[in-house]
Amino acid sequence: MSFSAVRAAGHGGKVEEARAMPAEVSWEMLDKSRFFVLGAALFSGVSVALYPAVVLKTHLQVAPPPQAAASTAAAAILRRDGPRGFYRGFGASLAGTVPARALYMAALEATKSAVGSAALRLGVAEPAANAVASAAGGVSAAVAAQVVWTPVDVVSQRLMVQTAPAAAAAAHYRGGADAFRKILLADGVRGLYRGFGVSVLTYAPSSAAWWASYATAQRLLWRAVGPAHHDSRGAAMAVQGASAAAAGGAAALVTMPLDTVKTRLQVMDAGARAPTLAAAARDLVREGGWAACYRGLGPRWVSMSLSAATMVTAYEFLKRLSAKEGSL
């Protein structure tokens, strides 16, 4: 029995809780082929729009002191590389988007369904079961996606910053395939997975907190909006977007120090001896104080908030488009 079915089978207060939100499209209700094909197209489009903010954030994180303002760094990229400078490494990043998003969505929905159903059967209240299921889904999705995203990050970030002054001595890459080959020759598979541990440490708790916060914020906002608007597409997009933006901004703030350390580890030149996580963190603090851990926070905050709002509204829309006939 699916999470939605178990939830609907409750009595009294649980039924009232379920009515506080519109019906959810569960993993069992999805046409998986349609879900993955449409999802790849939707999320590729979102990546095109948000990639420049990721490039700017990466430049700020690896730049030596003194720290330049985001606008100054953006102007420098534009002056040095033109508009295409904001899309360096995009091809490599996009190539990883489809399998990574597929892994993420499959792990998220399957885990949410399994954990949510188990929690309800154990007598956990529906709001708590939903939050726990969302958190567990976030952890499993983040870990699964990092298997693909870490090598993609390593390659795309090297390409992003290779024309920056701080990377003048680094290897020159002619494109994603060339970067992949040179990193693999210099460091082996291990070189492609630089920062994997810190990526999991960054994104697993962040994803858990994000999905749990998103589920809770949605529930609170739907209560305020009222059942009369459950069938309104505009109300659904507003509630989902606001919940996602708030959760994304908070996650950006909490995970920023680890993300900065991860980025610096990943953009090191091929063949260079990688420092430990602790050594990289100490070097960063020694270089610019604790404020250095938050380099690029502005672009990352904007990117994560906009990405979260856009991704979630697209994701919820995608789930409804992919629902099997007669399941809603």
Image (cartoon, grey):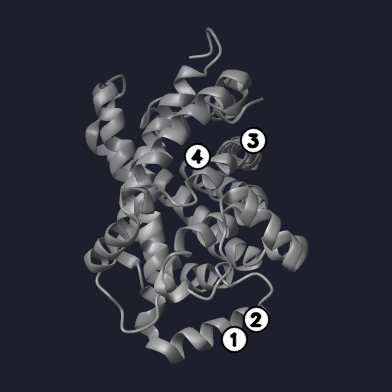
Q: Residue at x 37, y 31 (%)?
A: 21
> Can you name the residue that lies furthest to the bottom here?
286
Residue indicated by mark 4: 126
- Contact (Cβ within 8 Å) of mark 2 with mark 1: yes
The three-letter code of the residue at mark 2 reads Thr
Residue 115: x, y in percent? 64, 42
Label 1 to label 3, Cα distance in Å?
38 Å
Judged from the image, the secondary structure of the residue bearing numbered disc 2 is: loop
Q: Residue at x 24, y 62 (%)?
A: 75
Residue indicated by mark 2: 276
- Judging depth in this view, the residue of 9 and 239 nearest the camera is 239
> Residue 103 appears in which quarter of the rendering?
top right
Residue 268: x, y in percent? 58, 72
Q: Earlier in the sequence, mark 3 or mark 2?
A: 3
Label 3 to label 2, Cα distance in Å?
35 Å
Answer few, some or many: residues within 10 Å of disc 4's Cα (few below 14, many 20 plus, some between 14 and 19). Answer: many
Q: Earlier in the sequence, mark 2 or mark 4?
A: 4
On screen, residue 271 versus residue 312, left or right, reads right
